Amino acid sequence: MFINWALQEIQLKIVYYGPGLSGKTTNLNYIYKNLDPSIRGELVSLNTREDRTIFFDFLQFEIGRIKNKQPKFGLYTIPGQSYYAESRRIILNGVDGIVFVADSQQSRLSHNLELLQELEEILIESGQTLQSFPWIIQYNKRDLEKILPVETLQRKLNYFNVPHFQAVAMTGQGVFASLKAIINLVIANIQRRLT
């Protein structure tokens, strides 16, 4: 959270975190295309030749007021490939909320676990923990074959019983429900901190 006192704005950062190709960028693209252009900024995307996000997508929009200040949300994704671990640490700096985008495919469970463990380690290094941090899980790719039941994913990934959503980011299913949930958690957390 950053407060711009001159503009009476609270800048909040939400990061979509998860393994490579889990649907983080697809989430942001869907949100961007379906938000009113008057409340969103520009979408910035950096890609490799393989068309994978290597740094971040940035999207900013405004909603309501917090303690008489205008909130501005920046939405970011992280590159999920293992060789971008340091970039993930940098992008998480100053994060206010996280949407963990889990790939529902059976073959991707170990990747989900690896990235979730890494996320917890990064938060602990910054003096926080998933147990008390605003985050949700989105179980993406629910339309594919050979996916794990939600109950299995819950047992393996959601050990703090945070809000979770089933999604098909390509069609938008669950995308805005996930976004609304993380925004509500972040706003509640910020209001507690500003009291």
Image (cartoon, grey):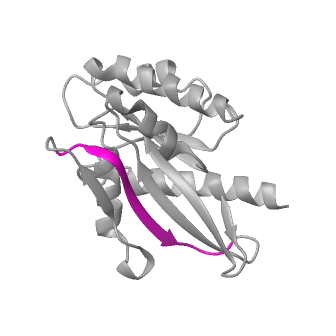
What percent of the width, then of the height, locates residue 41? 40, 73
Q: Is residue 173 visible?
A: no
Q: Is residue 116 magenta?
A: no
Question: Up-down: is 185 above or below 119?
Answer: below
Question: Up-down: is 110 above or below 191?
Answer: above
**x 40%, y 27%: residue:** 150
What percent of the width, then of the height, locates residue 25? 31, 49
What percent of the width, then of the height, locates residue 32? 33, 65
SS majority, magenta:
strand
Give the number of callouts: 0
Residue 132 found in image quarter? top right
**x 28%, y 46%: residue:** 53
Residue 112 found in image quarter? top left
**x 35%, y 40%: residue:** 79
What span is colored magenta in the figure? 51-65
Which image quarter holds the C terminus?
A: bottom right
What percent of the width, then of the height, locates residue 47? 23, 49
Return the residue nearer the eye: 146 or 51.
51
Residue sticking out furthest to the right: 195
The answer to whether residue 94 is left or right of residue 55 is right
Q: Is residue 182 visible?
A: yes
The answer to whether residue 68 is left or right of residue 70 is right
Which image quarter holds the N terminus?
A: bottom right
**x 44%, y 20%: residue:** 113
